[in-house]
Image (tube, rainbow, N blue to C red):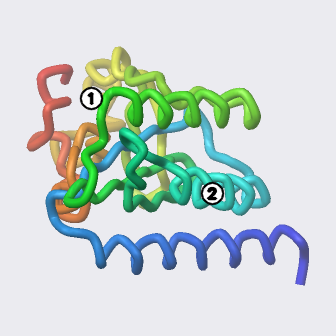
Amino acid sequence: MSNNRVAQLSAHQEKLKFMRNLLAFPDDARVWIYQADRPFADEDINLINTEIEAFCAQWTSHNSALRAIGGVMHDIFVVLVADESAARASGCSIDKSVAFIKALEQRYSRRLLDRQQIAWLDENEALQIMPLSGLKQAVAEGRISPDTIVFDNLVSNRKDFLHGWTVRLGDSWMKKFM
């Protein structure tokens, strides 16, 4: 088996692990989604997931440990989840997470804090990325329609992540840019 295939299988196992762990969190657990400007390499995903796990294990708010998990989804999304029932994520703890994301940006040469990029699934269910400013033209050209499945990275809790992260463009906040 090639090294690339091993990396792909390992990345898939990490995604399944993240989803299993996510099911143990309450619906109101807070979610942050950071979309990369291009996919991570399979071998990098495993390293990033290890870094995310280490970050989540030491993430605190006012010296109280946050119960947190995270992972890379669909090769481009870094997702962090915090159960705030014991300790609430505050300004300082959120600053720590942003610093962590900035470190990932530097280490893996990706833009993760650019909220002007959108992702969608094309007719073959392949993930595509484009600037939000190009949405109107993509609709006019027929590459995207109101029925296209897009990723709403503004969901803020576990329930919305599980049930509303992927949504029809026509049902999303992005429809105003069509």
Residue pictured at 20% horizontal, 59% vertical:
85
Give the image quarter of residue 108: top right
Residue furthest toward the front?
63
Residue 139's tag is 1
Identity, as a three-letter code, of the amino acid under mark 1: Val
Give the image quarter of residue 82: bottom left
Give how far across and how far down residue 112 sits, in percent.
Answer: 53, 31
Give how far across and how far down residue 4 sits, in percent.
Answer: 83, 68
Can you tell which of label 2 and label 1 is closer to the viewer? Answer: 2
Whether residue 74 is visible to the viewer of this picture, yes or no, is: no
Q: How crowded is mark 2: few (under 14 residues within 10 Å), some or many (20 or more)?
A: few
Give the image quarter of residue 50: bottom right
SS of the residue under disc 1: helix
Give how far across and how far down residue 7 sits, in percent.
Answer: 77, 70
**Label 2, label 1: how many angstroms apart (C-alpha)?**
41 Å
Give how far across and how far down residue 110 sits, in percent.
Answer: 65, 31
Residue 54's tag is 2
Viewer-nearest residue: 32 or 38 = 32
Q: In this view, does 19 lie above or below 101?
A: below
Residue pictured at 40% horizontal, 80% vertical:
20
Residue pictured at 89% horizontal, 72% vertical:
3
Question: Does 80 sit left or right of 142 as displayed?
Answer: right
Residue 18's tag is none
Question: Does 155 sit left or right of 89 as displayed?
Answer: left
Identity, as a three-letter code, of the amino acid under mark 2: Ala
Viewer-nearest residue: 22 or 45 = 22
* Image quadrant containing the N terminus: bottom right
SS of the residue under disc 2: helix
Viewer-nearest residue: 160 or 100 = 100
Residue pictured at 30% horizontal, 42% vertical:
89
Q: How crowded is mark 1: few (under 14 residues within 10 Å), some or many (20 or more)?
A: some
* Image quadrant containing the C terminus: top left
